Image: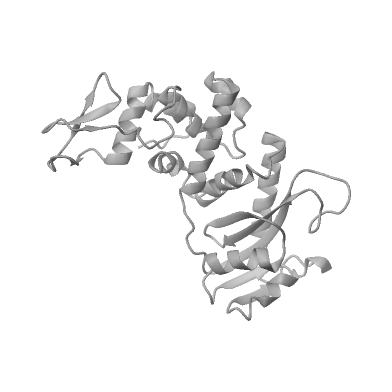
Amino acid sequence: MFNGPTIQDFFKQFPTDDACLDYLMQLRHGETLDCPKCGKHGKFARIKKEKAYSCAWCGHHIHPMVGTPFHKSHSPLQKWFYAMYLFTTTRHGVPAKELQRQLGVSYPTAFRMAHLIRDYMGAVDGEPPLTGHVEIDETYVGGKRSGKRGRGAAGKTVVFGILEREGEIYTSVVPNASGKSLIPHIEAQVPKGTRISSDEWMPYRVLTALGYEHTTVDHGCKQWADGDTHVNTLEAFWSMLKRSIRGTHIHVSRHHLPKYLGEFEFRYNRRKRPETMFADLVASL
């Protein structure tokens, strides 16, 4: 399994498209398997003139690229793997222009590859319940503008987040910061009885009545923490997200923002095991 963070390690393990195809076959189907046609257990042999493997007993073919974004792509499989390597080893994301430069493909191809990879990064984890002690908060994405900042700022996209202390994070683009927009996400992701820390935003005041253990800090009075009640962990994630968008992507439209959120969730949720990021992403295809 790939577990090296360097480019040298990557190209040592994946020097050719064939090496990438073998890795994909092993991750998706294993070294040995029961043949879907004849039912016999054993290894499938590579078919040299096809991107497929054949059952030694009945000749049934398995095409490991079917159902993945590589299946009908004209780009070599190694370039797809290298693009995913870049996405799983960078902290601030990979712009399409950088993929275009490193892969030697057209900008439309790089743009499409980047968004397909983000789609899969966002889909890997699903939406497991967040328990223990969680933080909730919203942020506003859209660059610097004159006028009001924070809640109520014009022309920005509202993003809501729920973060489990020492666990995973959930984010979603929402229409606004009203209770109607925020509370359904909390009820869907956080079991009743869970402890929730938030700031003093009025829509959160119903959480105790809804069955949560709710504690707050008053940001309006410059109170950032009260014991272990704070949203500092989530604020740090927002800060990283915005720095990355400004420094790497310059601007992200509301339409594409959920894909970028999924990408950053993927990295955050695997921060303690970065060596598995590449394998997790390939295995999700």
Q: Which residue is drawn at 25% across and 20% down?
A: 48
Nearest the camera: 37 or 24?
37
Q: How many labels does the image show?
A: 0
Q: Is residue 280 above or below residue 61?
A: below
**Residue 8 in view:** yes
Left or right placement of residue 270 versus residue 206 in this view = left
Q: Position of residue 206 (x, y in %)?
A: 67, 77
Asked which quadrant contains residue 110, the reply is top right
Residue at image position (12%, 33%) is 58
> Residue 139, percent across and down?
71, 55
Q: What residue is shown at x 70% (from left), y 45% (from top)? A: 242
Residue 284, by quadrant, is top left
How is colour applied across the structure in the image? one colour
Q: Residue furthest right?
A: 147
Left or right of 83? Residue 231 is right
In depth, the one of 88 and 139 nearer the eye is 139
Quarter holding the N terminus is top left
| x and y, in percent, of residue 37 in the image | 16, 40
Q: x, y (%) of residue 113? A: 52, 31
Q: Is residue 217 left or right of residue 282?
A: right
Residue furthest bottom as drawn: 209
Q: Can residue 228 be seen in this view?
A: no
Q: Residue at x 51, y 42 (%)?
A: 119
Position of the C terminus by quadrant: top left
